[in-house]
Image (cartoon, helix red, strand yellow):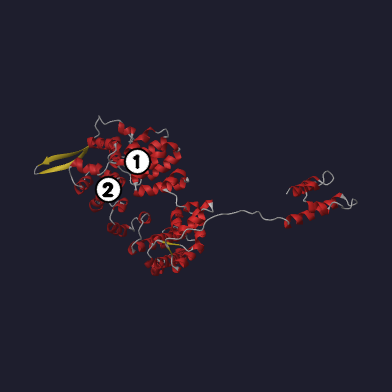
Amino acid sequence: MKFWDSIIDTAMIGTSRRQPDTGLFPTDLAAHFKDQNETKDQEELFLQLAAFASSYRKSGILPPKQEINFSPAATEENKYCPSEATSVLRDILSEEKKSLLAYWLKNCHRSNQIVKPDLVPVLLELGTKHPRLKSVIAACCGKRGVWLAALNPEWQYSQNQSDEEIWDTGTPEQRRDLLTEKRSIEPDKAREMLQQIWQQEDANQKMIFLEILHKNIGDNDTAFLESLLNEKSKKVKESGLQLLKRIPTSAVVQSFENALASAVQLKKEKRLVFTKTSLHYQLPDSIHDKIYQLGIDKLSNIKDLSDEQFVIIQLTELVPVSFWEKHLAMGPPEIIDLMQKDELGKKLLPPLVKAITRFHDSKWAEHFTKHSSVFFIDLIPLLNSEEQERHTIRHFDEFPESMIMHQISRETEWSLPVARKIIRHTAANPHQFTRDFFSRNIAMIPTALSGELSGFDPKDVMQLGQWTRNRDYLSQLLKLKAQTNKAF
């Protein structure tokens, strides 16, 4: 509307210096002022013109027309979730309980059901704010979600793109999620995908991808990881080396194993009617410098630990525990017992535990919990579920914070005895374990605990007020969780 721009210019400069260009005015608007009284002063004429043009401008514009051509959404293949489930979902959305939303969506997807049409745009919009929910939201929105996504670029994560399309043209977040998923179910395929695009990525993106390779690391990854030792980026090279240290058959671990074999020997001494068996530790002069180039420190940084002992301890942490069985020709119980009787052997027990967790050796974890005089909490995730629960309950009061950290990393719901231990501790420490703690971990808290919450009230009146608020919030979460379980 150039005529309005002309009026604005006049207002800015002043009527004494400039008048609106009526030649830019629409014909009917210009005609109205063609025969205006010349005796009127310039300011009055301008104000009349501006007022009239403003009304003309507001009332005389037609909205732009845009043709939109699209076909209707495809017919849904899955059933809509029942009304009870929809009602729970609406409550969850109204109270903005994100963790329960994830729980509800997973149950919906597991049941091969989809949400009612009116909730599809609501969920698609939520997916833009909560990236981790995108894939399950897309699955629960069905064909209508794909159809709607075509009309809004921000929702297009719900379209049925192939893995190849996502990997080639997806956002960094989409590619990371895809690689994570592939690594969990097809580790070799994930590594091959990464090799295809490796040279195109910058160092920061390479570091993100290498972090994903920690999952299901294995022999087949060795060649690729060894090639990273020639990378220009120091941090990428170091990350590749750390991954190689987790593969028992890699040349890196083998060099550590050979060094440890030459440094630790089984010594047998005959004493009258019996033979004393002990461990003898000594680094040979011929030990290869390569182990120091691979990250082993020569000099001790621990008090009362010699440089030689420090090197042996580092090697113990980086060598699979099965090495000790082969090298000493003994079983795990005998080896553990032998080390507990030896001064340096006792110091080798913590790094031995680190080796057990590094190489995920469940067999040794079980032997250690049975035969070690010291309990090592880091071994709990490697035990079977029955043993995990037994040790969690037995040692919870001794290591409450660590036990809770282990439990929240699980993917299955806590048993009632474990849940009681955790909730009792959180009730006694309500300012540390706030509503956010319960919200994030509601999927693991059993609904059967709902009727017991008041029994966890702390005796300390200073803590009771905050716990009461936390308890009421947890009660609401458990109620919605129970309704979700019942609906599906």
Q: Is residue 53 left or right of residue 251?
A: right
Say above or below: 281 vs 139: above
Q: Is mark 2 on a helix, strand or loop?
A: loop
Is residue 67 or residue 91 the one in the foreground?
67
- Residue at far bottom of view: 451
- Residue at far left of view: 273
Tell me residue 347's x, y (percent): 27, 43
The residue indicated by pointer 2 is 361
Q: Is mark 1 on a helix, strand or loop?
A: helix
Residue type indicated by callout 2: Asp
- Residue at far top of view: 286
Is residue 79 or residue 353 the one in the foreground?
79
Residue type indicated by callout 1: Leu
Q: How crowded is mark 1: few (under 14 residues within 10 Å), some or many (20 or more)?
A: many
Q: In this view, does 444 lie to the left or right of 21?
A: left
The residue indicated by pointer 1 is 243
Q: Can residue 188 be seen in this view?
A: yes
Is residue 59 or residue 31 the one in the foreground?
31
In the figure, residue 248 lies in which quadrant?
Answer: top left
Tell me residue 448's x, y (percent): 37, 67
